Image (cartoon, rainbow, N blue to C red):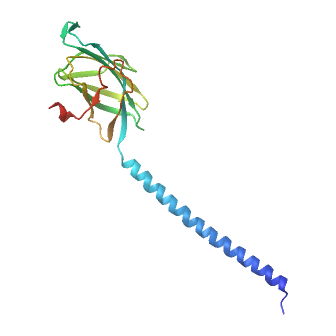
Amino acid sequence: MSNPVEINYLLVVISSTISFVTGGAMGAVLNRYFLLKDRRRQKEIEKLPEKLTLKTIKETVISHKPVNFEKIDCTNLNYKEFVLRNNTIKDIESCEVIFEFDKESKIAKDETISKTGIDRIKKREQKQSEFVYELKHFNRTNEITFKFHIANFSMNFFSAVIDKCTGVELEFIEIDIVEQPSIQPCQIVSKEKFK
């Protein structure tokens, strides 16, 4: 007859071995599940477009009354300043940024500040309230500041669009504070609103 102490010891060893094997198998199954889930999430993130952020830095009404600014007669005058930042994980070789303000307004003066200097970015005027800026070699974490003096504004709308840049979207960060409480902060709208 076997010794009861040996039987107990044998049962402890067998139960420990079974616990170890099933625990390891369960651990391997859980590890595989979370690995596949993380891969799926990563693939979904890779499918999403990367983003450039456009942040409103400053917005000021310079005049509610008619004023002559830069040899232009203005019924009113507004100043807006934006910063465009490359938050993507790649350097952008070339793209265009289109700014459009109220369709009755006129861009009286604009200025760009980038790593290459002041007003070095090539631009073209589509209409009096719309400019297209051609960005070249817009590298990661770089910023470009856009400053506008807008004359004859009415609704305080604007639209900003990225063009000729596949897989990149523009994310707009709204301003919290407007220096004059008499106007509401500008609103970004789709280009269809201007037609």
Residue 128 picture location, percent across and down: 17, 20
- Residue at image position (37%, 37%) is 51
Closer to the camera, 186 or 71? 186
Give the residue furthest to the left: 195
Closer to the camera, 158 or 121? 158
Q: For the N terminus, which image quadrant?
A: bottom right
Residue 94 picture location, percent across and down: 31, 31
Residue 186 picture location, percent across and down: 29, 26
154 with respect to 170 (left or right):
left
**How many numbered discs sit on the rendered protein?**
0
Question: Does residue 125 appear in the picture of this structure?
Answer: yes
Question: Does residue 109 appear in the picture of this structure?
Answer: no
Identify the image quadrant of residue 14. Answer: bottom right
Identify the image quadrant of residue 101. Answer: top left
Closer to the camera, 122 or 169? 169
Give the residue furthest to the bottom: 1
19 with respect to 137 (left or right):
right
- Residue at image position (72%, 73%) is 16
Q: For the C terminus, which image quadrant?
A: top left
* Residue 116 drawn above or below residue 9: above
